[in-house]
Amino acid sequence: MKPVLYLAAPLFSHSEKTFNVELAGILSVKFDVFLPQRDNYLIVDLIAGGMSVDAARRKVFDGDLGAIQSCDVLFAVLDGRSVDEGTCFELGYAHASGKTCVALQTDPRRLLPIGNNPMLECTLTQVLQSLDEVVAWAR
């Protein structure tokens, strides 16, 4: 049985969702990957289907939180000018829950001149910088 990995990443644009699927495929060699956009709900879809905003928020939150509680590893994508706020919460929650936290950051932009915010950096056991490093790590 493979360990369970929660893939925390932005999932709003077409390119983000496509990248997440590619990344999940790479990671699935070693892990059973929980990909929120695939394995839970997207709030925009729930609201478009008639659910109230409050109910949709709660459904997404509860589903993702349960998946983090059940995972062995949280893998966070930190790309972007600033790290996605949902990813930041997921990373912090996983760290506080004693989960192993690893990240991918291919984007050289950082908000601080010394790198990532310490509240992010200190939660991570490793930061990978390319898909090739992810492939090697997932073996």
Image (cartoon, grey):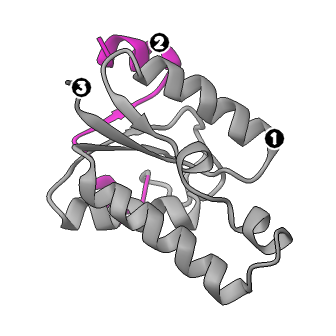
Please say if the residues under marks 1 and 2 sit with CB atoms less than 8 Å apart.
Answer: no
| Picture residue at 38% right of the left edge, 66% below the top | 65
Mark 3: amino acid: Lys
Instruction: Pinpoint residue 8: horizontal percent, then vertical percent.
Output: 48, 49
Left or right of 13 in this view: 75 = left
Q: Is residue 117 above or below residue 36?
A: below
* Residue hosting label 2: 132
Q: Is residue 56 above or below residue 99?
A: below
> Which one is in front, 88 or 139?
139
* Position of residue 69 measured from the top left corner of the image (x, y, whole percent): 26, 60
Name the side, left or right, on which 33 lies relative to 57.
left
Q: CA distance from mark 3 to mark 1?
A: 29 Å
Q: Which range is magenta?
A: 116-139
Q: What x and y, as percent, mark residue 5?
A: 33, 39
- Density class for disc 3 (Cα within 10 Å; few <14, some 14-19, many ≥20) is few
**Residue 9 visible within the image:** yes
Quarter placement of the N terminus: top left
Foreground tag (2 vs 3) = 3
Q: Amino acid at mark 2?
A: Asp
Q: Which residue is mark 3?
A: 2
Q: Disc 1 or 2, which lies upstream in sequence?
A: 1
- Give the structural element (helix, strand or loop) at label 1: helix
Q: What residue do we see at 67% from left, 50% from top?
A: 11
Is residue 123 in sight in this rendering?
Answer: no
Q: Nearer the viewer, mark 3 or mark 1?
A: 3
Circle 1 residue: 14
Q: As displayed, is residue 44 above or below residue 1?
A: below
